[in-house]
Amino acid sequence: MTKSLLRLFVPAALVLYVLAVSARAELPIIAKARAYLGTEAALNAVTSLHFYGTLTPIDPVGKGDAKLEITFQAPYQQRIESSSAEGTETTALDGFDGWQRAVDGKDASKKRMSLLGPAQVRRLRANAWQSLAFYRGLEREGGEVIDQGDATIDGIACRKVAFVHAKDIIFTRYFDKSTGRLVLTETESGGTIREEGEIIANGIRFPKSITSDSRIPGGVSQKFKVTFNKVVVNEKIPGSVFALPMFGPE
């Protein structure tokens, strides 16, 4: 085959291969799950999400509720900030940079600042993708979506799908086969996430509350509930919100 023919056929073959992979990757339950959340136009238009709510510790019981804000912005920016009388804790992701900061509620001069390690950054990136992509396109990010068959959760006939970002970062989701509603999410470490109720923003369904039961290092259970009162879609968020703060006095 001449070089000119190679230039003609190889790109065409590559396009056909990409289309074939995309076709195989899209499971019917993914389309149904997205349709349950909103229209394709609404989901595809999302560039940022800003959740306002309250975090309530369940186990171990904390000293009270905390005000919570969670922000995501495409492609890989995230900020979680909780504040109470005890202080303010912030965890943020800016691309490949991750950081945490804690400020004492009684003495603002008492601060702790740390950079997140590669494993923590990878997990935050996976969480940001999960929150903004609405189940579609993980293969383009180097991950894999695996259909794991039928399962029954809380008496509901579900389809079990694993979203594999890496061997140590897996979100296994159970979708109601009849409606596409997300019934349960499991993590690779044995944690669970359940959603209840709904808030409609920009024509998209978001959960009213999330109950998370996770396993932290040492096998200790950590359970909490987040109740949202507001969701803002496509807010223009300055990059400085996610950027690594300067060390030293502010």
Image (cartoon, helix red, strand yellow):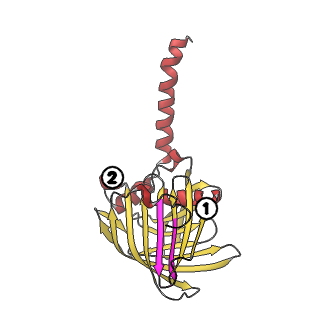
Q: Earlier in the sequence, mark 2 or mark 1?
A: 2
Q: Nearer the viewer, mark 2 or mark 1?
A: 1
Q: Residue at x 41, y 66 (%)?
A: 181
Q: Position of residue 93 (x, y in %)?
A: 52, 59
Between 75 and 5, the residue placed more toward the observer is 75
Q: Position of residue 148 (x, y in %)?
A: 57, 58
- Res. 126 mark: none
Numbered disc 2: secondary structure: loop
Spatial CA distance of label 2 from label 1 is 30 Å
Please indicate whether residue 134 sits to the left or right of residue 202 in the image: right
Q: In the image, which residues are magenta? A: 78-91
Q: Which residue is mark 2?
A: 45
Between 58 and 145, the residue placed more toward the observer is 58
Q: Quadrant of residue 69?
A: bottom left
Residue 68, above or below 134: below
Query: Is residue 210 something that shows in the picture?
Result: yes
